Image (cartoon, helix red, strand yellow):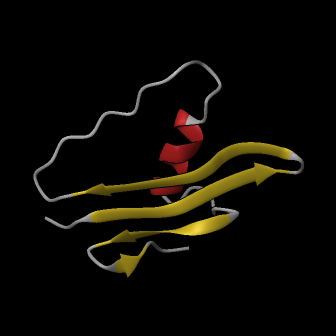
Amino acid sequence: MSRIVVRRLEKRYGDAVVLERVSLAIEPGEFCAVVGASGCGKSTFLRLLLSQEQPTSGTVTFGGRPLAS
């Protein structure tokens, strides 16, 4: 298993800021849940982790390597 590291992730759609300065590290074997109010960016964050969308800025690494673009 590999470590997932998110550093200062941001996503914007035009002038709308969806995610701002999100940082997270998930160690091998850890469980992580994403919870929050409707419209707070949970689905956008997960799409970024799956490389379905590209961040406006910041990085996501898996096992020390950047996720595929």
Q: Which residue is drawn at 55% across and 36% down?
A: 43
Q: In this view, does 44 lie to the left or right of 24?
A: right
Q: Which picture quadrant has residue 4?
A: bottom left
Q: Is residue 49 left or right of residue 32?
A: right
Count of all numbered marks drawn on residues in the image: 0
Vertical order, 16 against 8 (above or below): above
Position of the N terminus by quadrant: bottom left
Q: Which residue is drawn at 45% across and 56% down?
A: 23
Percent coordinates x, y for residue 51 in the rendering: 52, 61
> Depth check: 45 or 21 in front?
21
Q: Which residue is drawn at 56% across and 59% down?
A: 9
Vertical order, 37 against 56 (above or below): above
**Which residue, as the protein is rendered here, is positioned at the far top?**
38
Percent coordinates x, y for residue 17 in the rendering: 76, 45
**Which residue, as the protein is rendered here, is positioned at the far right?**
15
Q: Which residue is drawn at 63% across and 62% down?
A: 55
Position of the C terminus by quadrant: bottom right
Percent coordinates x, y for residue 64 in the rendering: 30, 79
Percent coordinates x, y for residue 46 in the rendering: 48, 45
Q: Which picture quadrant has residue 66?
A: bottom left
> Depth check: 34 or 67 in front?
34
